[in-house]
Image (spheres, helix red, strand yellow):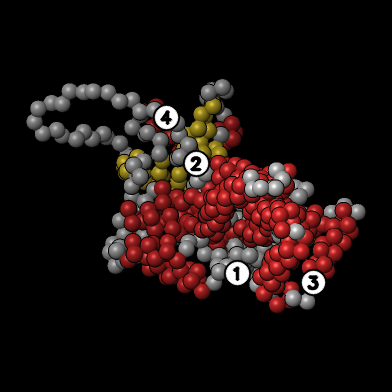
Amino acid sequence: MTSSLNLLKELRPVTSTTTRRYGKFLWVDAYHTTIAPGLRLRTSTKSNWLSFTHPEGQLYFHMKRDHFSVVTEENVLNVETDNLVSSYLALIEKRILECGIILPQACELFVELRSDESSQTSTCAYYFVDHHSRCLFWLEPTSSELLDVGMVVSDSHLDIALERLYWVHVEFFPMHVCTQMTPLILDNLISAICHGMTDRMTSRSSTFPYTEEKCDQLLRALSLRQGEPLDGHTLCFVARLWGAISNQRFITYYGQENAQLDRLQPPMPEDIVDRTGIRALANLMLWGVPNHHYSKLHDLFVHDNVYIDHWQAFMTECISEWRGLLVWAFSVLIASILISMLPRASLSSAMAPILAASSSILSGSILLWRHHDFEDATAPFAANFLRSSKSSDWGFLPLSVVYSMPKAMYLWSIGLMVAQLVFWTFRVVGVLWASGGAGFLALMGYGILYFTSLEGDHTDSMATMLRSHWQTFQSDSAAVTEPLTV
């Protein structure tokens, strides 16, 4: 017989998000059977457990005991499993008596058996929920780090984390508890989503997790059940939405002294590596395109969080641009080849625009291949991708340069093709006409850049801007870049 001390060590505190619910890899055992004639009567088993089926299809069991009720996804219809679960329930009740713990009235226990075949031992993963205070609790001291709850800044912040875990539990086990829930949770949810939708519509940096379109769809679905008694199916999706909102409140420090009110506002200091000299040189060589992607990537990944709609919009924009540039770069490639075939044209002058256009086509094709279906990715996938792509020494600079290659090389191919055309004109019609045409093109390009630039940019000439970039590069390349705290 295992000692009480050893048994206590086999109780393992977990949360509603760290169970094996979606991590089971068990096969069904299907077979053919003989169906008896006449009406088939459903068989019932004599058990203290009541069985329920989750709207997703998961079977679970519920039982009321003296001081709390129990839910489990273990197959307690199996005698061996039922005996093992019962032994752990007895152990938990003994632990409650030994520690003098007073349980709340609306208390529910979740248990899950976990076995280690190598050591021939089993453990019982568990947690308690209180339906009145909407939180989880355990029988022994534990830490938020071990439970993977996240770092907290106050007791009220921890309460939000525990409330989110409570709603996840209700989402997983809604069928037996739906009659005990107040309809106010549906009304309050509608109010929260209405406010979030309005915030999204009137702010470009809202922290609400759902877009205006998604909010409208959710409100339509919720309004169909408003005023009706809560059933298990309704409670399931209501709890899921409350869990998502509670999770967003936790990561934005809702109700705290320094809550994150703006999506682009980091709630705490971040170490940002910014090699301004190298970045200035990269922008100088690549027509300033990396700056656009650099700022976008930083806005997408504030405090290591990703808002999926902003990620999808960014990826859709990038993929659409890369696809369009394939066509335009291919057109420049063909044009450069045709110019090189003109009388008195030089094939060597066509090599530079052909190489630039080919680089644009190659880089764009690789990026499209590597980012297939990225515009439909989930938030965890986008966060993992950005986290792995962010260099500890260079930040998002390498990724922004890579994303800039198709457009920047296309712009180089345009400029080099124009130079190729001017060189051919010089050989055909002479220096005067060629110089006049080149001057006209230069003035036209400068005029477009001047009149489409910001008002503050007019005071800086192109030479001043180039000199400023070069001085910044020289000063920063002479010193080691330190992480900046913002």
Asked if the residue at tag 2 contacts the one at tag 4, i.e. Cβ–Cβ closer than 8 Å, the answer is no
Q: Which residue is mark 2?
A: 19
SS at badge 3: loop
For marks 1 and 2 on the same chain, the one whose residue lies earlier in the sequence: 2
Q: Which residue is mark 4?
A: 26
Please state which of the two labelled residues, at mark 4 or mark 2, is closer to the viewer. Answer: 4
For marks 3 and 4 on the same chain, the one whose residue lies earlier in the sequence: 4
* Res 296 quadrant in image: bottom right
Is the residue marked by circle 1 packed among few (<14), some (14-19), or many (20+) residues within 10 Å?
some
Is the residue marked by circle 2 packed among few (<14), some (14-19), or many (20+) residues within 10 Å?
some
- Which residue: 54% across, 37% down? 11
Asked if the residue at tag 4 contacts the one at tag 3, i.e. Cβ–Cβ closer than 8 Å, the answer is no
CA gap between label 2 and label 3 equals 62 Å
CA gap between label 3 and label 4 equals 69 Å
Q: Give the image location of residue 341, x and y in percent.
A: 64, 45
Identify whether 61 is placed above or below 308: above
Amino acid at the residue labelled 2:
Thr
Q: Give the image location of residue 249, x and y in percent.
A: 55, 62
Please state which of the two labelled residues, at mark 3 or mark 1, is closer to the viewer. Answer: 3
In this view of the protein, can residue 459 be seen by the observer?
yes
Q: Which residue is mark 3?
A: 461
For marks 3 and 1 on the same chain, the one whose residue lies earlier in the sequence: 1
